[in-house]
Image (cartoon, rainbow, N blue to C red):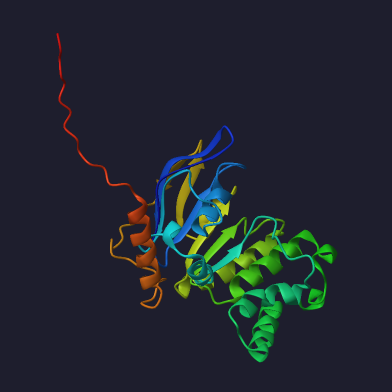
């Protein structure tokens, strides 16, 4: 389970999040809606530890992600498939090479990479633009490539910022059908969008961001022990070691009794 607990974030004098709290459970679909600059992208960045909160805690399976060492952080991020707003494709890579990136990071063999990429090119109808660079793509092709890349590494959690941006009606329905299939497969899906109807299309829990606060709708009951099992027995010792070091940094406060001495 992912949790934001009393998280506040400011950019300069603007407070984007004000003691915001929310929980995201395994296999759940959560659709965060709000206007531009409402804090949607900030929450995505917090979950990936791209951004750190000014106050409050971001947890994954009851672990404060600020305590994850850098070499473990990379393993943590591999659990996610991410589509950023605007796509954020690597400009020096072709469509094929962009989609292949998560698989390369995971250390997959070239044959497996080629097979998976060809499958995604066909699924997202990108075969004709497979060797195009981002500058040669339409806005809709950028979105489709970014979504294909998000799915390439068989992620446990999908974080999709404006997953339907710049798509026409036919393309939107096509992408929604892919996301619905991923829901059936048991992925945790979190979307960030200005379009509130996306939550209805995905039958997800709707969370509205307004003035730095979160408002939940259609909240379902969950087992409080739900876990995504992100952290294996192998990585836990590294996190525990970090926790102990952080605890050591905190000064020991000794209680001192002060006696007032009065003189004439």
> Is residue 25 at all visible to an observer of this figure?
no
Q: x and y percent of residue 204 in the render? A: 46, 58
Query: Which residue is most to the top?
Result: 264
153 displayed left or right of 235: right
Q: Please provide percent x and percent y for residue 122.
A: 70, 80
Residue drawn at (61%, 85%) of the image: 108
Residue 72, how many percent across, how many down? 48, 70
Residue visible at 58% across and 69% down in the picture: 177
The residue most toward the front is 264
147 relative to 157 in the view: left or right: right
Who is closer to the viewer here, 65 or 217? Answer: 65
On the question of residue 101 being in view, the answer is yes
In the visual, does 87 lie left or right of 68?
right
**67 is higher (above) or lower (below) than 256:** below
Q: Does 247 sit above or below residue 170?
A: above
Q: Is residue 207 above or below residue 69?
A: above
Residue at image position (58%, 71%) is 178
Q: Quadrant of residue 191?
A: bottom right
């Amino acid at each position: 389970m992912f949790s934001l607990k009393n998280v506040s974030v400011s950019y300069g004098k603007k407070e984007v999040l004000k003691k915001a709290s929310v929980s995201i459970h395994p296999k759940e679909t959560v659709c965060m809606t709000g206007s531009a600059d409402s804090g949607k992208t900030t929450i995505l960045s917090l979950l990936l530890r791209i951004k750190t909160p000014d106050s409050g805690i971001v947890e994954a399976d009851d672990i404060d992600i600020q305590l994850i060492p850098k070499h473990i952080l990379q393993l943590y991020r591999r659990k996610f498939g991410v589509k950023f707003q605007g796509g954020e494709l690597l400009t020096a890579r072709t469509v094929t090479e962009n989609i292949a990136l998560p698989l390369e990071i995971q250390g997959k063999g070239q044959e497996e990479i080629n097979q998976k990429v060809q499958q995604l090119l066909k699924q997202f109808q990108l075969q004709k633009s497979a060797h195009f660079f981002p500058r040669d793509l339409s806005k809709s092709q950028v979105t489709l490539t970014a979504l294909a890349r998000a799915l390439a590494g068989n992620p446990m959690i999908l974080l999709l910022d404006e997953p339907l941006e710049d798509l026409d009606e036919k393309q939107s329905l096509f992408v929604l059908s892919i996301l619905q299939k991923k829901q059936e497969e048991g992925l945790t899906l979190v979307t960030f969008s200005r379009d509130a109807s996306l939550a209805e299309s995905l039958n997800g829990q709707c969370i509205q961001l307004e003035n730095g606060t979160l408002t939940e709708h259609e909240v379902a009951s969950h087992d409080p022990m739900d876990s995504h099992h992100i952290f294996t027995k192998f990585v836990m010792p590294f996190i525990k070691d970090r926790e102990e070091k952080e605890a050591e940094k905190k000064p020991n406060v000794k209680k001192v009794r002060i006696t007032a001495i009065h003189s004439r």
